[in-house]
Amino acid sequence: MLFIDTDVAIDITHGLVTLEQITALVGTDDRIAIAAPTVFELYFGLYEMEVRKTRKVSQAKIQEERQGIEKICRALVHVPFDHLAAEKSASIFHELVAKGLEIDPFDCMIAAVVLCQGNASLLTHNTDHFNRIAGLNLQSAGC
């Protein structure tokens, strides 16, 4: 299973890469997935634009972003953030903090979901951050 990170999902919603291009990266028996924390980050950004108005964005642009998120969510396998991923992400976060390599807690949550799936990879532009996490299979999103 290949998970897409938030940065890749944003690229898809902005038309910088297509779901078809992502699908071409995996074998015919493999699936493309999205972790629940990734979906949270996508909607968090949307509501930040819409409700908090951190940027001057038109209602049409907000609607376009919403439609892009919904398209991704319909097209991909959803993997929840369960109690095993919660424990794993807390462990990852504090191990990194102890080493002085702290990363965003949501990145820890995404990584934990991927790691809990066993033989899975994460497609991201953010390999510098995620390389800090032992055992995480990464693919650089140079697509």
Image (cartoon, grey):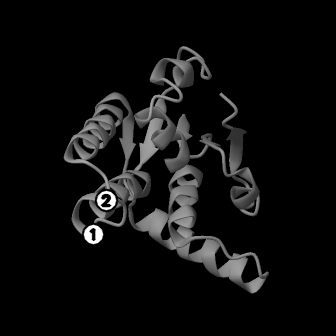
Q: Report the residue marked by disc 1.
A: 52
**Residue 80, image x, y percentages:** 36, 53
15 in relation to 33, above or below: above
Figure quadrant of the N terminus: top right
Identify residue for label 2. 49
Q: Residue furthest right?
A: 99
- Left or right: residue 139 versus residue 108 is right
Q: Quarter-wise, where is residue 128 in the image?
A: bottom right
Residue 76 occupies which quadrant of the picture? top left
| Residue 36 at least partly seen | yes
**Is residue 83 rendered to the left or right of residue 101?**
left
**What x and y, as percent, mark residue 41?**
41, 58
- Please name the amino acid that badge 2 sits on: Met
Identity, as a three-letter code, of the amino acid under mark 1: Arg
Q: Residue 19: which numbered mark, if any?
A: none
In front: 89, or 100?
Answer: 100
